[in-house]
Image (tube, rainbow, N blue to C red):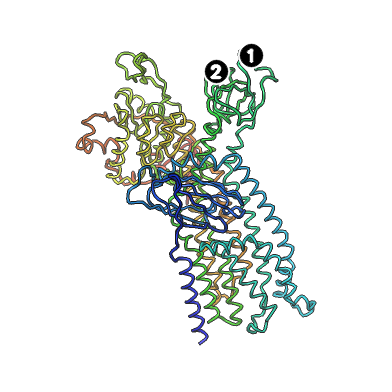
Amino acid sequence: METIATIVVAALLSLAIVWFFFGKRQGSAAVVDNGRQRITVGVQGGYSPATIELKAGMPTTITFDRKETGECTSHVVFSDLGIDVHLPGNQRTNVEIPALAPGDYPFACGMNMVHGSLHVVGGSTPAAGAATAHDAQTASRATAAAPAHSPAADASAAAENANETRDLTRRIIVGTVLTVPVFVVAMAMMAADMSTWPAWLMNPWWQFALITPVMLYCGWPIHRVGWLALVHRSPEMNSLVTLGTCAAYLYSLVVCIAPTALPEGSREPYFESVGVVITLVLVGRLLEAKARQGTGDAVSALIGLRPNTARLVDAADIASGAWRNPGAGTDVAIDSLKPGDTVIVKAGDRVPTDGVIVAGCAQVDESMVTGESRPVPHGEGDEVTGATTVLDRPIVLRATTVGDDTVLSQIIAMVRKAQATKAPVQQLADRIAAVFVPVVVLIAAWTFAIWLTVGPQPRLAHALVAAVSTLIIACPCALGLATPLSVTSGLGLGARNGVLVTSANALQRARNITTVVFDKTGTVTQGVAHLAQGGEDCVAQTDDMPKVSYADDPVKPDSAAAIAVLHARGIRTIMLSGDKEETTRRVADEVGIDTAICNVRPGGKAWWIERIQTEAEAAGDTGLVAMVGDGINDAPALATADIGFAMGTGTDVAMQSADITVMNGSLSGVITAIDLSHATMRNIRENLTFAFMYNIIGIPLAAGVLYPLTGWLLSPMIAGLAMALSSICLVLNANRLRNAKVAANLDDAMPTPSHAEIIVDSQETRSQNAFSQKGHDMFHFGKNKTKDSDQTFVDPVCGMTVGADAQSVEHQGTTYRFCSAHCVEAFKADPAKFVKG
């Protein structure tokens, strides 16, 4: 009868848990005021309301009223909109949301633990002016990026983090001092004969006196957030720790007050477990916070590049040369600079803002922008970028852009916006994390019921230990952080190497590129024009200006090497050009392009991208088609391609249409982006594997599945230690990505001039029949391939993956393929060193 009653109670409790956590939630509608929707959301252990109902086609102001401090809810992230806003503790912060199309737009805290949603209604088609999730990312840039990451906001966030660190440190010290005596005695009681020890050590009341402050004071940040999250029906890691420690504390309190109410053999307190678990969780939170700072070091480093002051100089001093005197000029705050101001930059100083050199010349270190470590000479009339470093001589520059319009500010905004997005691979983890905590509570409830029903004596003690361990060992935080931490580190790594990725989606997909389409002028070549002669390809200027030609436009020094590396990896290369066939063929053959299309009209590049995508798909090529360009006429093609690359030396329109911007204008940036994608996704897979395996293995162990075989039951203290370490391991693994080597190495590349296939863009060529007959061969999608040509191989020297057309060497009847001449020579010098078995 007792068994039936236990099962019935557990079943009813399970139904209540399912209803409470998964029942339908009522949303709150925003109020319309002067054409704008407004609503206030409380932030305290969760979002209240968590579901916000909005009307489509109307902008919204959400006021987040944060009534707590701490890292968890210090940011609110709208991943579909690319918005990440800092929420100062105990303050109200407005977040501007652009007009949206109907649909659901989730938002979450910066640690991806507390969640909410915008539910936008208003018809099946977008209202006038409404934006989809993709459009809203662009629209939100102006409204959210600047106020969210102003210097004041950054200073506020830094101060709040410092206060939290001090508070955690203080609570850890108190918890350690009070818990160690209880823990030592508890362990001694298990391992030694206590008959000769003082009687008062056996009294649980002194343990109660020491652990109660740990429970109420040290554990307050955990319990406050944990209980509030439960009230908001959005439980997270703190909720599980709260439930587990409260159960153990109350059970131990009953042992003190009314031990006879418990069965014989179940009258031992678990105060030591309460103290150890709370202290370890706090230690883990402190270490995790410190480690997490490393994942955002790239943005912090970029912010630190911005000088605080600039030295103004007047026109008279520039004209007379007096600006060269050490005392010339007047120091002013960097924020007071205006376009047109002239400033002195001394040797060794950072350039305060974007501008044009009006006096002097110097070598400039532009590695901050381009990732290229070699200094670049600059003289009068040359543009320089803010935060670059003048190395050898002073210069005077005239400010052209200041504040949020500078290249540095745009880089910071782009990286932060990208860090606010989610990679598609995160979707599975998010779906699991959404139900994870309720499922763990259900598992803990049934663990308690099973142990209480069929477990060995003392059943109640075993049931309590197993249930508490199950609650404490589970780590939803690991699932929530597995992807965002790697994405943040990866985007920062790309920024340090001169590759700016606009979204986590592009970061994930770049590794699947199998075809790269290049614009010719300014991308493969240097974009240098000369006055057109008769018969030359030319570009019309205005009516009163001569025509110019790019027929003799020199190829960039590293274009051929970069294309050779792409070929070694089995990636097809195609070039689009508006030039005539002769000019196009010369450039394509010089750099080793597979296929070149000439006479392309300004608006025809996007059409060819669509055609290449169609032919690739028809031929069974499941990879992505990337477009690399730099001009205004490239923007439609960049937007049409699966992945768009813009040269940072090109136009703003191109960069705004692209998924990835290569700041130094080199084709090697495409390789860097692909390697960055591979490195980031490898790190994400490691984190996700660890997060899933930790919970899949840890929860059953805590529930006691090994007890029938080994007689071993996991202690709540060990469960707490494992939970604390799990998140730390993820953070440390993500931090490893910061040191990954992703910069393209072209030193060992072997450019091989080729005879490119040429397609002449014409109405006949564009016809469906002509293209179907010629296109497959021209793009190499429909060639009759050998079995080996579909395969990839591993270079035995460096481990790089290469295609079947890579350089090869025969050794003892086996063909080995290599990425470069360097690897070939290393292999030939000592084959036994690289041949396994």
Front-most of residues 483 and 417? 417
Q: Is residue 782 left or right of residue 687?
A: left
Q: Is residue 290 left or right of residue 194?
A: left
Q: Nearer the viewer, mark 2 or mark 1?
A: 1
Q: Which dot marks residue 321? A: 1
Amino acid type of the residue that numbered disc 2 sits on in the rendered structure: Glu
Q: Earlier in the sequence, mark 2 or mark 1?
A: 1
Taking the spot 26% from the left edge, 39% from the top edge, the residue there is 776
Give the farthest residue toward the top.
320
Where is 413 relative to 3, above or below? Answer: above
Q: Position of residue 303 (x, y in %)?
A: 59, 37
Amino acid type of the residue that numbered disc 1 sits on in the rendered structure: Gly
Give the farthest residue toward the bottom.
1
Q: Position of residue 760 (x, y in %)?
A: 26, 28
Give the farthest residue toward the left.
769
Circle 2: element type: loop
Q: Which dot marks residue 380? A: 2
Front-most of residues 594 and 434? 434
Q: CA distance from mark 2 to mark 1?
A: 14 Å
Q: Which dot marks residue 268? A: none
Give the farthest residue toward the front.
34
For the residue carrying disc 2, how many other residues have a C-alpha within 10 Å: few (<14), some (14-19), or many (20+)? Answer: some
Q: Position of residue 152 (x, y in %)?
A: 61, 41
